[in-house]
Image (cartoon, rainbow, N blue to C red):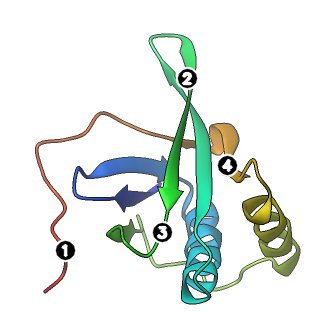
Amino acid sequence: MGRLIYGARGVRIEMDDLLLAHLQMLTIAKLRRGEPFLLSWVETIDGVDRSSSIWMTQNVDLLWEYEGLRPTKLDPQQLETMATQAASNGGLNVGEEAHNPPVESTTVSPAS
């Protein structure tokens, strides 16, 4: 289980390493082209499903952490599907494949 750590508040979104690698590749490609997008997921807290979303933009610190080595074999079809969703008004929804655990006491600082 890897994690995307988003912004100065350190929002942690955990997901499978392979999904995280696809998201990283997609995010880098889109942000290089100046194309921010909405990323959404579902989390279950105390048996209640909750939907969360963040705005993926060049102005926010992003950190990808992998449980193991970053997967190198990515599925081009999955990347295409994710790119199509990310370009839509509804944004990219990784659904229940990711969740947002409580923010820990650690904070994310921008690289200097």
Mark 1 highlights which residue? 110
Measure the C-alpha gap from mark 3 to mark 1. Answer: 14 Å
> The disc labelled 4 sits on which kind of residue?
Val
Is tag 4's residue or tag 1's residue first in the polypeptide sequence?
Answer: 4
Q: Residues within 10 Å of mark 4 (few under 14, many from 20)?
A: some
- Element at badge 4? loop
Of labels 2 and 3, the one closer to you: 3
- Element at badge 2? strand
In this rendered view, identify the residue nearer to me: 59 or 1.
59
Q: Residues within 10 Å of mark 1 (few under 14, many from 20)?
A: few
Is tag 4's residue or tag 3's residue first in the polypeptide sequence?
Answer: 3
- Element at badge 1? loop
The location of residue 85, given as percent across then percent down, is 80, 59
Mark 2 highlights which residue? 50
Measure the C-alpha gap from mark 4 to mark 3. Answer: 17 Å
Is tag 2's residue or tag 3's residue first in the polypeptide sequence?
Answer: 2
Residue 34's disc is: none
Measure the C-alpha gap from mark 4 to mark 2. Answer: 13 Å
Is tag 3's residue or tag 1's residue first in the polypeptide sequence?
Answer: 3
Instruction: Give left or right: position of 74 versus 81.
Output: left
Of labels 4 and 3, the one closer to you: 3
Mark 4 highlights which residue? 94
Of labels 3 and 1, the one closer to you: 3
* Residue at screen point 55% across, 23% down: 50
The location of residue 95, given as percent across then percent down, is 68, 40
Mark 3 highlights which residue? 57
Is tag 1's residue or tag 2's residue first in the polypeptide sequence?
Answer: 2
Q: Residues within 10 Å of mark 3 (few under 14, many from 20)?
A: some
> The disc labelled 3 sits on which kind of residue?
Thr
Tell me whether the residue at label 4 lies in contact with that at label 1, contact meaning CB atoms closer than 8 angstroms: no
The location of residue 40, given as percent across then percent down, is 61, 45
Is tag 4's residue or tag 2's residue first in the polypeptide sequence?
Answer: 2
